[in-house]
Amino acid sequence: MLSALILLPLLGATIIGFWPAVIDAKIARITAFVFAGVTFLWSVFLAIKFNPAEISQQFSEFIPWVDALGLSYNLGVDGLSLPLLVLNGLLTCIAISSSDISLQRPRLYYSLILLLSTGVTGAFLAQDLLLFFLFYELELIPLYLLIAIWGGEKRGYAATKFLIYTATSGILLLASFLGMVWLSGGSNFALANLNAASLPLATQLLLLAGILVGFGIKIPLVPFHTWLPDAHVEASTPISVLLAGVLLKLGTYGLLRFGMNLLPDAWSYAAPWLATWAVVSVLYGASCAIAQTDMKKMVAYSSVGHMGYVLLAAAAATPLSVLGAVMQMISHGLISALLFLLVGVVYKKAGSRDLEVIRGLLNPERGMPVIGSLMVLGVMASAGIPGMVGFISEFVIFRGSFAVFPLQTLLSMLGTGLTAVYFLILMNRAFFGRLSTQVINLPRVYWSDRLPSVVLAVLIVIFGIQPAWLSRWTEPTITAMMSVDKVVATVSVEKSK
């Protein structure tokens, strides 16, 4: 059942890319959307069949692969990975549906998007360290090409920078994974058989450092964030949706699954420093966003800040804070995708993202009133206004983290205020006032441009009003995970004494 989530987009990419007959852009997009849509519906079906009360991996699949390396094709899903799988399926459909029908080399473009979805899905499902690494690296080449070929004016620089950073991330993770297995005396890379928590604290800290930097690049956390604004600015709108909505979550997912979960005593030792690191990322990301005049770069820096909340929650390592971290991953995925879609429509119709150029886009007669209204909803959700999913995820993080790190939590809460500041600047400059002369004659905005944003806006409101529909899949898994981690950490401390 889980292999279908990997094989369906892979089959779609193969058909689109290698079908001998000529396939035009419209047929390629329809074909890609069909395969992505079926994959998404299959993930929803698995979510319906999923039993939240069962804390172990469900729908597990195991096939021996390369015994000499200890590598197996081992898949499973639990409450931590399931919401991210559904999010990946949804945003892949939205990215395909929002792609420009007239783009060049459509067969390669849609094949790469489906291949990217394959890599992300496999990483979320992998229950083998080496298998996770293979899928983690698989998504590197498609995303590099999607930026380098269909990106903006400086796409070559942005794509190369992304490639170098992400390749470095992979090297560090592979070294840490190999160290976990070899130093703990393991014979294979299966997560279920790994006993890294038995290693000495100094060794665990060394391995954890590689994991933190490796996934810190992917998230990204300050100071490893500099590739992200460049990648977002040069990437096309659909690729920015996938990059912010899904790919950054590989980093936060990895921290929870392989850092906090596998090395709990080292994680506890490093937690105060991680919480401080989170504060730096939150405040630095928000401060940089305030200084931007490019709408897309402002939204990109907001991601740096909002991902810092996840690190704070993981550092606190309470059941409530980690639940908030997972909710924040989903919340940020929906909200950032919405904001990038809306900025993309503005750029497509107005020809600019510069806040010094565009004005008055909320004008009901000659502007973009529906896009402006959706943008108001999106920035309110990002700023944590009650009634939106952004509020409940941040509130749960702060509530769960405050008892452990009160000062760091209070400082991180300033980030929500700064979020309101820079998005208020964006709204005031771009959408209010008179239409500027540069954008006085805007092309018509069709419902095909609005519909993907409307879908995301509806989900943001629904999960904001009824967050239990989001948390019910994850809460039992997180509670069990944190109980095991606490026992392991306690035992390790007693042994050290």
Image (tube, rainbow, N blue to C red):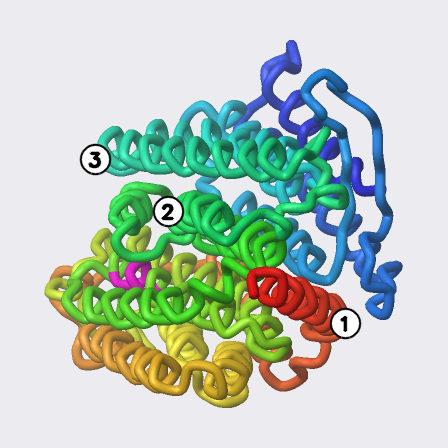
Q: Going from the N terminus, do you reach mark 1 or mark 3 first?
A: 3
Residue at which label 1 appears: 476
Residue nearest the viewer, comparing 405 with 356: 405
Spot occupied by residue 427 in the image (x, y as percentages of width and height):
27, 76
Estimate the spatial distance between the alpha carbons at disc 2 and disc 1, rounded to whole Å: 29 Å
Left-right relation of 356 to 233:
left
Q: Which segment did they paint magenta?
A: 298-302
Residue at which label 2 appears: 217
Left-right relation of 327 to 481:
left
Residue nearest the viewer, comparing 118 with 368: 118
Residue depicted at x 56% and y 32%: 178
Viewer-nearest of discs 1 and 3: 1
Residue depicted at x 50% and y 61%: 267
Label 3 neighbourhood size at 10 Å, few (<14), some (14-19), many (20+)? some
Disc number for residue 154? 3
The local secondary structure at tag 2 comes to: helix
| Amino acid carrying mark 2 in the image | Ile
Residue depicted at x 86% and y 64%: 54
Residue depicted at x 53% and y 77%: 393
